[in-house]
Every structure is written in structure tokens, then in C-alpha cells.
Amino acid sequence: MEMLIAAWVAAGLVFASFFMKTIVPLRKVAIAGNIAFIVYALMGINFAIFDKVLPILVLHAALLILNIMRLREVQNTIRSVQAMTREHASLDALTPYMKRESIRRGELLFRKGALADRLYVLKKGRIKLVEFDKILEAGAVFGEVGIFSETEIRTSSAVSEDDSELYSLTSEKAVELFYQDPRFGFYIVRALARYVSEGADIASRQGDADQLLPGTSSEGVAVSTAK
């Protein structure tokens, strides 16, 4: 009777794992199911049927180790992503894949409409994104928007405001790391979201400025026509 109860509990846990919608709960329930089946198999010793349930013991012992390893991997990734949300994300780990470059003050790094073939990490100096009238300081990452856009072209020109030092990463390597490294992928998603937000703010300010121009309101047009 005890083995029957243990078997049903173990089967219920395995069945419940298929209803989990996220990976962490799924792994935890799967681990509980593995442990339950191991207990069930060990109970076979007392009932003289251990040789019949030995394959179950071996299978779920192996699955237990695998599920624990996968759970730790996911938890480590989650902690890394959470750390990136609490502080400025450093991309120093990408340095081995990057090429060091130096540019002088006033030098054009890339022009709007050009092919986006690499992203940059600014180590020293300042870079101005001309169309956005934005100054980037040391530590900034830029150029990623063009790489991950559908058109793969630059959305703004970049000019060095000082003698600057930066590191570049080719578009091919950036795309590869996006799929291979969850931390880098998360950083890129946040950067693109920030770009969209800044673009919306610029459009909103431009719209407000247009409304203040003479003759743009319906009242202004009516007065002008009356004259």
C-alpha cells in the first residue's frame, strides 16, 4: 500500500510539472517528482521487488542531477540580470571580442544613413550623436540600434567631441553574443527600449514646439484669412 501511495504521489508531481508556465517552478516540481520516484524505488527493497524498480531508480537519479544543474544555471542567469537592473551594466567581459580604436576631436565616427557594421563602447572622451543633440560620456554603449534594426543603417551621425578612445564590436559578433549570452541580450533589449523612449520624447517635444509656431493653430489660420 505504501508503495502504491508513493507511486501516485510521484506520478502526480511529474504530471504537475507539465502545467508549469515558467522554467524555475517547472524545474522545482520536476526535482520533487524525481525524489519521489527515488523514494518509491528504494521502497522496493522492503518488498523484495527492488530488481524490478531499479531502472526507475537509475533514471530518476540521473534526471535529478540534470534538473538541479539546469535549475542552478537558470538561477545564476536570473541573478545576473537582476544585478544589471540595479547598477550600471559593464560590458568589460566583451573586451576580448572587441577592437580598440582612437579618434581625434571633431572626427566623424559614422554618418547617418551609413551601414551599421559595429557597435561601440566609449572608454575615454565624449561622442556627440548629432541628430539627437546628445553627448555620450565614458562608459556609454552606442551604435547598437542600427545593428539590430531591420534596415541595418545608422539613425544618427556620431562625432568625437574630444580625443576619444573606444572599443568596437562587429555586427556579426554582436548578433552571435545576443543569442549566446543572456546578460548581453538583456542589455541590448534595455538599450533599444531606452532608444524608443528617447525618440518618443523628442517627437513629443517637437510636436509641442510646432504648436507654438505662428499660424499653426486653427485660430491663427482663421485670423490670417480674415486679414
Image (tube, rainbow, N blue to C red):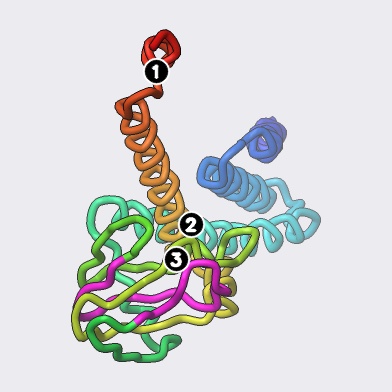
- How many angstroms separate mark 1 from mark 2 (CA)? 56 Å
Q: Is residue 110 magenta?
A: yes
For label 3, count other residues whose C-alpha is less than 10 Å away and answer few (under 14), some (14-19) or many (20+): many
Residue picked out by circle 1: 217
Name the residue rendered at 21%, 68% in the picture: 137
Q: Which mark is residue 47?
A: none
3 and 1 marks in contact (CB < 8 Å): no
Q: Secondary structure at mark 3?
A: helix
1 and 2 marks in contact (CB < 8 Å): no
Name the residue rendered at 48%, 67% in the picture: 112
Front residue of 14/200: it is: 200
Q: Secondary structure at mark 1?
A: loop
Look at label 1 and name its amino acid. Answer: Ser
Among numbered discs 2 and 3, the one appearing first in the sequence:
2
**Furthest-right residue in view?**
52
Percent position of residue 48, x then y: 73, 51
Look at label 2 and name its amino acid. Answer: Val
Residue 164's image quarter? Answer: bottom left
Q: Is residue 183 magenta?
A: no
Q: Which residues are magenta?
A: 108-128
Percent position of residue 84, x then y: 31, 57
Residue picked out by circle 2: 74
Name the residue rendered at 40%, 89% in the picture: 96
Percent position of residue 56, x then y: 73, 55
Quarter of the image with the N terminus is top right
Residue picked out by circle 3: 184
Number of marks: 3
Is residue 73 visible in this depiction of the protein?
no
Look at label 3 and name its amino acid. Answer: Phe
